[in-house]
Image: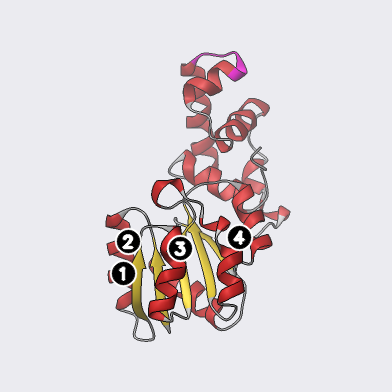
Amino acid sequence: MKLLICEDQQILLDGLVSSLSKEKSFEVVGSTTSAEEILSCLAKTQADLVLTDIITKDKKNVLDYVARLKEQYPEVKVVAITGFPDITFMEKARKVGVNSFVYKNISTDELISVIKNTYAGYSVFPSRDKTRNAFLQSLSDAEMTVLRLYCRGLEREQIAQEMFISQSSVKSHISSILQKTGFSSMARVAIYAVSTGLIFAE
């Protein structure tokens, strides 16, 4: 399988190229940092699958280019990957024809599995199973509000202003959320909550 990789951070791009090149069934035939260059790279490389970050060089959103890519190369599979817990990305990805969608907190082995399954014709998207919300049930109303605001991208100071509480209170709520959920960071809590559909980022 021939892979084309798009990632705007060079160190991450180099890491993906290095890691995925070790997989015997993969051949990384091209890489770029910009969504705008994907089509020209496909013309040169004839890649079978594009693994791409969503927000690329110069803040270009790859989802704005996928429809044209699919029109010109309908047989090419697209796997979108992001570190942003933004539910709108996943919704738009489905609409424009992205084959699979994953978050950057997965392991290399999981990513390889997603790529292989996508190439085989399967579509992999984060689960929206509402029965997986047990870890949220123990959160207080204030903690849930903090989590929702965090999922919207607000910083600690902004959350404090929105809730009319001190930053130290926000910090206390965050510590409690992490303790109750078992996650190592709020980013991981947010990614899980949004990707599973437990919280919808506005």
**Distance (Cα) linking label 3 and label 4:** 16 Å
Q: Residue at position x 39%, y 86% from top? A: 25
Mark number for residue 52? 3
Give the vertical position of 147 relative to 80 (above or below): above
Residue 147 quadrant: top right
What SS does tag 4 mark?
Answer: loop
Q: Residue at x 57, y 56 (%)?
A: 64
Q: Residues within 10 Å of mark 3 (few under 14, many from 20)?
A: many
Query: Which mark, by number, is residue 13?
Result: 2
Q: Identify which amino acid the numbered label 1 is placed on.
A: Val
On residue 126, the disc is 4
- Taking the magenta stretch, the answer to whether it contains residue 164 is yes
Q: Are marks 1 and 2 in contact (CB under 8 Å)?
A: yes
Location of mark 1 (residue): 17
Dominant SS in magenta: loop
Mark positioned earlier in the residue sequence (1 or 4)? 1
Q: Which residues are magenta?
A: 162-166
Mark 3: secondary structure: strand
Look at label 2 and name its amino acid: Leu
